[in-house]
Image (cartoon, helix red, strand yellow):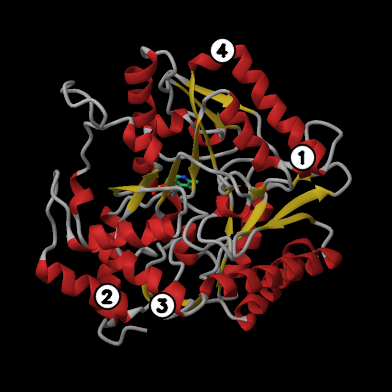
Amino acid sequence: MDGNLSANDISHIVDADRAHVWHHLTQHKPFETGEPRIIIEGKGMRVWDQKGKEYLDAVSGGVWTVNVGYGRESIANAVRDQLIKLPYFAGSAGSVPGALFAEKLISKMPGMSRVYQTNSGSEANEKAFKMVRQISHKRYGGKKYKILYRERDYHGSTLATMSAGGQDERNAQYGPFAPGFVRVPHCMEYRAQWDLTGEAYAAASVKAIEEVILAEGADTIGALCLEPVTAGGGVIPAPEGYWPLIGELCRKYDILLHIDEVVCGVGRTGTEWFGYQHYGVEPDFVTMAKGVASGYAAIACCVTNERVFEMFKDDTTDPLNYFRDISTFGGCTAGPAAALECFRIIEDENLLENTTKMGARMVANLWELAEHHKVIGDVRGLGLFCGAELVSDRATKEPMDEKLVAQVVAECGAMGVIIGATNRSIPGFNNTLCFSPALISTEDDIDQICETVGKALGKVFG
Ligand code: PMP
């Protein structure tokens, strides 16, 4: 814990926060009597709050971001050196870390070729949406403009990305939304809408998307946007056979495939650098954010293949024929400098392998907990991105009351382990406990997280 902050400093910080900070995803009423939690410091897998309380962070900074863990001096040094040399330059000029990071990233993404730097996952997704719209104008007379997105998937907090938002509960009170976004069914085997499992269920789910394409008119559909493992919508990996069919569907109807790797990207799912690489599917756009620089600097990317890129450079006589888009802070060099160092750490420390091993351990531990706690209806995961869905009745799969799920999260916090629950504020939808510890997790960390969850379930449900 930071010895430089006195009790007076801390009390001043808490007062300033309570008086002036509007926290994300937070109902502030309880702060009138209670106290906001302020995280002062982090090291490895652990963080400390203003009271000096230590937590094991099982959610990598709250929202699945700090993949390489806290306190990495080599990243801080890389950013510091770069900032002294050149902090920023935007527009059409490149930068040293921008070029080197793009080269490194593309080396991990066979079939892809271009990196467009932005600030956030939402923005990266919007860039892809804009490219799809522009391609529609350039190639299809403006007709192939619709973007398909799935129920339960999330693509960001801006109005255009919310228009592609599959969780009604998140969108409530923010409409109306942008036209040209069309919802298609999801693929969640645990809550399958048909009496099918495995590959048969996967095939039926893709067929259901095809039906929407045919109803809308395939010549009006520009792209299909999906998450490899649906994150905030409930930690939902697809069953075997789903992704190859998605690839075929896009090829059949000349639809661009946009994979949102904001959560799954950069090692989170283990073995592979990106979630889609587990399935042999070939995307046209891949967007990413959180793990790119592990939160040490703000950087997100919209990565395309050469086919997409070519469509923007083939006609020099047309003054409108390039991607007329800029992002002011896309010119910050701290992002790619930090990202380059994060990629080096993941390579040198073999974190993809560690993630696979630790993820398997976590899923096994959670299933073991399910033997003693009937409230666990399902356990899902890929790498170190795992969920345990709580139900009040295993037979009917009735979602657990959100207040009780929140109590489990709070009990874990009280015992010094920070976990999450997806869609926290919505009744019936926030019933999945969510775990995404850093890729440096050890067996002891995983066991401590799961043991604490077991104790919390015991306290709340007996
Ligand atoms: N896509 C997915 C799958 C996400 O989970 C998120 C954020 N949680 C976003 C996009 C948006 O990213 P950002 O918050 O950086 O805008």
Q: How far apart are marks 4 and 3 (CA)?
A: 59 Å
Mark 2 or mark 4, earlier in chain:
2
Amino acid type assigned to the residue bearing label 2 in the image: Ala
Q: Kindly identify which numbered label has been placed on residue 217.
A: 4
Amino acid type assigned to the residue bearing label 3 in the image: Lys
Residue named by callout 1: 191
Comparing 285 with 369, the one in front is 285
Residue named by callout 2: 76
Comparing 93 with 40, the one in front is 93
Residue named by callout 3: 51
In this rendering, would 401 be left or right of 172? right
Comparing 453 with 255, the one in front is 255
Local crowd size for mark 1, using a 10 Å CA cut-off: few (<14), some (14–19), many (≥20): few
Q: Nearer the viewer, mark 1 or mark 3?
A: 1
Residue contact between numbered discs 2 and 3, judged by CB atoms under 8 Å? no
Amino acid type assigned to the residue bearing label 1 in the image: Arg
At x 81%, y 44%, the residue is: 198
At x 11%, y 64%, the residue is: 86
The correct choice, above or below, for 276 with respect to 177 in the image is below
The correct choice, above or below, for 347 with respect to 195 in the image is below
The correct choice, above or below, for 211 with respect to 66 in the image is above
Q: Under tag 4, what secondary structure? A: loop
